[in-house]
Image (cartoon, rainbow, N blue to C red):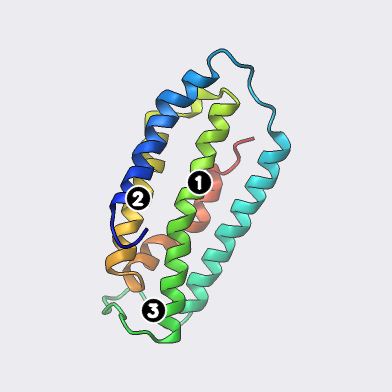
């Protein structure tokens, strides 16, 4: 998915169309699903995943190697640079797993939570992260993602 922006863009557009059009249309004449147990597992998995990404950002550079001054991007294949690039890729992947937030809202007929802002945010994030990961995966992308990785969990509870 990193060789071209097109797969990410297509996934984002499909997400937005499904979240705003197809999902609510398919659920219009159906009862809402009871997904409490699924949501408990999903929320726990997402929280653990985000905590791991946060730890990896710290361990692969932010605990001593990086600071917030201007620094060059490390394009080398050193173990630390590769670990950071790998962590950035997992952060990118996590933006797709977060599409399930919206799916669960739709399946439970909580359409008031599927606001335009919600759909735009989740629809734009993978594309935004793709560009950072593609062109500056080590220094720049990690500094942008470090804090949101844990703060995103504030809204995680879709229960």
Badge 2: residue crowd in 10 Å (few <14, some 14–19, many ≥20): many
Specify the label residue 154 is tagged with. none
Q: Where is residue 143 in the image (x, y as percent from the top left)?
A: 37, 66
Q: Is residue 146 left or right of residue 47?
A: left
Which image quadrant is residue 104 in? top right
Along the polypeptide, which appears first: circle 2 or circle 3?
A: 2
Q: Locate the C terminus and report the quarter of the image it occupies.
A: top right
Q: Where is residue 68 in the image (x, y as percent from the top left)?
A: 34, 73
Identify the residue position indicated by label 2 in the image: 8
Q: Locate the N terminus and report the quarter of the image it occupies.
A: bottom left
Q: Identify whether 116 is placed above or below 81.
A: above
The residue closer to the viewer here, 7 or 121, is 7
Along the polypeptide, which appears first: circle 2 or circle 1?
A: 2
Task: Kindly check if marks 2 and 1 are in contact, taking CB atoms under 8 A apart as contact.
Answer: no
Q: Position of residue 82 (x, y in %)?
A: 42, 79
Give the CA distance from mark 2 to mark 1: 14 Å
* Residue farthest to the right, as pictured: 37
SS for dot 3 = loop
At x 41%, y 42%, the residue is 122
Tell us which disc is closer to us: 2 or 1.
2
Tell us which disc is closer to us: 2 or 3.
2
Tell us which disc is closer to us: 1 or 3.
1
At x 63%, y 46%, the residue is 43
Identify the residue position indicated by label 3 in the image: 66
Give the CA distance from mark 1 to mark 3: 28 Å
The residue closer to the viewer here, 21 or 124, is 21
At x 48%, y 42%, the residue is 99
Q: Identify whether 60 is placed above or below 152.
A: below
Identify the residue position indicated by label 1 in the image: 98
Badge 3: residue crowd in 10 Å (few <14, some 14–19, many ≥20): some
Q: Position of residue 152 (x, y in %)?
A: 50, 50
Along the polypeptide, which appears first: circle 1 or circle 3?
A: 3
């Amino acid at each position: 998915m990193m060789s071209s922006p097109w797969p990410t863009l297509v996934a984002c557009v499909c997400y937005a169309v499904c979240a705003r059009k197809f999902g609510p249309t398919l659920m219009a004449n159906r009862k809402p699903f009871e997904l409490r147990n699924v949501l408990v597992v999903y929320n726990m998995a997402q929280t653990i995943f985000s905590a791991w990404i946060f730890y990896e950002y710290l361990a692969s550079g932010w605990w001593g190697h990086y600071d917030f001054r201007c620094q060059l991007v490390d394009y080398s294949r050193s173990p630390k640079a590769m670990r950071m690039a790998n962590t950035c890729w997992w952060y990118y992947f996590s933006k797709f797993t977060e599409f399930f937030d919206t799916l669960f809202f739709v399946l439970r007929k909580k359409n008031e939570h599927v606001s335009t802002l919600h759909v735009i945010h989740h629809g734009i994030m993978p594309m935004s992260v793709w560009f950072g990961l593609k062109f500056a995966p080590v220094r720049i992308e990690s500094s942008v993602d470090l804090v949101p990785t844990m703060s995103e969990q504030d809204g995680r509870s879709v229960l």
